[in-house]
């Protein structure tokens, strides 16, 4: 059942929930009328799983049952991501690797069903692999087992060599395109802060730790992807990842520039109030990528100016900045250097990268201007500056929660 890429690119823009619910009693129980129109009642704890099952069955002929405690995918953004990856890879693409397929194996199943690709689906979680293999077996009516090969990889190898470890486990020399939806969060605390610490109504876990948390987050995953690509060279034509944060995309693009990789494509996937970003890159020689090739992070002055509305003394601001540097990298050292007319200047050194932060007054009460200049990895600058004003001023969500206790 090959689908036209153009139709997949716009998938989910509008869904006739009333017609779909009329053919699916489980979905009908999760719908309600809003301003005269039928829509999904997302307050029902089972709604996400029921919707995913209905869309995959009705629109793609894919049998899917949500595994308890595992991540339930948002079908429209996975469909659009697969469509974009297919456009970038080109008409000649016939094979793919889904890194971190999870229990749903959804990207691999969609790539096989919609594009007819042969797909290796890899994961380091044994339970997730078992669930994924069971889903593949349930789709025997369209011969999914001949197209999708689920393999388990060692967690350490998967973290450091995500692509080559999976290819070795599957006994494959290479693939045309790598697809992945890596974990966003770097810790359980970050995940809890992001969702406000609110549990689901039914008390069930929305996803496993392996599906949502990685020590260095989605940027760390992409960093490992880049280094693995440089080792593999032409064995893989395109590597790609679906990201949950725009700031992650900027940091990944900075990493690609640092490694001299110029065949890069990016896109934005907008669905209602939810936005995701995707990046693809190739270290193999070839033409420019097809499809949306917007790049959000252009090469510019490496320094970054940040306005900091901190209602505190200059010494206290310096201590807050030092604390942030250490919180981001435990091995960071912070030292004072010649202020040269500024209020103060500090140097942050961590993992071989150096960053100078210069703070001056703006003329407004309780406001400062911070200029950060990297010496080494540009990724250190993005990591340091993203969210800096709210952290120093103690106004971001993390500090509001901490101060409320």
Image (tube, helix red, strand yellow):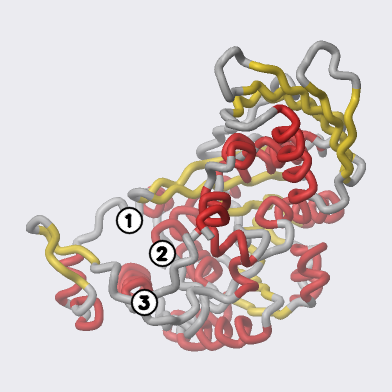
Furthest-left residue in this view = 36
Upstream in sequence: badge 2 or badge 3: 2
Figure quadrant of residue 266: top right
**Is 382 located above or below residue 155 in the figure?**
above
Horizontal and vertical percent for residue 391? 62, 42
Query: Disc 1 designates what residue?
Result: 12
> Marks 1/3: CA distance?
26 Å
Query: Disc 2 designates what residue?
Result: 75
Please state the total of marks drawn on the protein image.
Answer: 3
Q: Is residue 171 visible?
A: no
Upstream in sequence: badge 2 or badge 1: 1
Quick one: label 1, few (<14), some, or many (20+) residues within 10 Å? some
Quadrant where the N terminus is found in the figure: bottom left
103 to the left or right of 359:
left
- For the point 52% across and 56% down, the residue is 401
Figure quadrant of residue 35: bottom left
**Is 372 located above or below residue 330 in the figure?**
above
> Marks 2/3: CA distance?
22 Å
- For the point 44% across and 72% down, the residue is 199
- For the point 56% across and 39% down, the residue is 290
Query: Disc 3 designates what residue?
Result: 201
Horizontal and vertical percent for residue 68? 48, 85
Secondary element at image label 3:
loop
318 to the left or right of 202:
right
Quick one: label 3, few (<14), some, or many (20+) residues within 10 Å? few
Depth check: 218 or 363 in front?
Answer: 363
Horizontal and vertical percent for residue 46? 34, 78
Q: Are marks 2 and 1 in contact (CB under 8 Å)?
A: yes
Horizontal and vertical percent for residue 375? 86, 29
Upstream in sequence: badge 1 or badge 3: 1
């Amino acid at each position: 059942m090959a689908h036209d890429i153009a139709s997949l690119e716009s998938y989910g823009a509008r869904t006739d929930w009333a017609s779909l619910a009329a053919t699916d009693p489980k979905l009908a129980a999760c719908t309600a009328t809003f301003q005269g129109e039928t829509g999904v009642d997302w307050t029902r704890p089972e709604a996400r799983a029921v919707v995913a099952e209905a869309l995959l069955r009705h629109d793609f002929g894919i049998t899917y049952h949500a595994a308890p405690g595992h991540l339930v995918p948002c079908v429209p953004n996975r469909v659009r991501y697969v469509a974009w990856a297919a456009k970038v890879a080109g008409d000649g693409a016939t094979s793919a690797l889904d890194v971190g397929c999870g229990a749903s194996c959804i990207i691999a199943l969609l790539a096989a069903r919609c594009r007819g690709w042969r797909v290796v689906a890899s994961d380091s979680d044994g339970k997730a692999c078992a669930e994924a293999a069971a889903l593949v077996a349930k789709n025997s009516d369209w011969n999914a087992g001949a197209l999708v090969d689920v393999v388990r990889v060692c967690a350490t190898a998967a973290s450091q060599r995500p692509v080559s470890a999976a290819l070795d486990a599957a006994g494959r020399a290479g693939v045309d395109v790598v697809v992945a939806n890596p974990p966003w969060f770097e810790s359980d605390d970050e995940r809890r802060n992001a969702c406000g610490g609110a549990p689901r109504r039914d008390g069930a876990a929305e996803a496993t730790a392996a599906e949502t948390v990685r020590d260095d987050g989605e940027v760390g995953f992409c960093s490992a992807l880049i280094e693995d690509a440089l080792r593999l060279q032409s064995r893989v034509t395109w590597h790609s990842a679906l990201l949950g944060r725009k700031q992650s995309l900027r940091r990944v693009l900075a990493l690609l520039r640092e490694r001299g990789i110029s065949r890069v494509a990016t896109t934005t996937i907008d669905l209602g109030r939810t936005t995701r970003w995707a990046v693809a890159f190739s270290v193999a020689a070839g033409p420019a990528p097809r499809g949306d090739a917007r790049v959000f992070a252009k090469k510019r002055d490496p320094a970054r100016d940040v306005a900091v509305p901190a209602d505190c003394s200059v010494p206290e601001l310096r201590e807050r900045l030092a604390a942030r540097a250490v919180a981001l990298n435990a091995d960071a050292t912070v030292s004072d250097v010649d202020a040269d007319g500024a209020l103060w200047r500090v140097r942050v050194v961590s993992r071989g990268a150096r960053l100078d932060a210069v703070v001056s007054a703006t003329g407004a009460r309780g406001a400062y201007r911070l200029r950060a200049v990297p010496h080494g990895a540009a990724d250190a600058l993005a990591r340091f500056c993203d969210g800096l004003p709210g952290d120093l001023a103690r106004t971001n969500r993390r500090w509001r929660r901490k101060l409320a206790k």
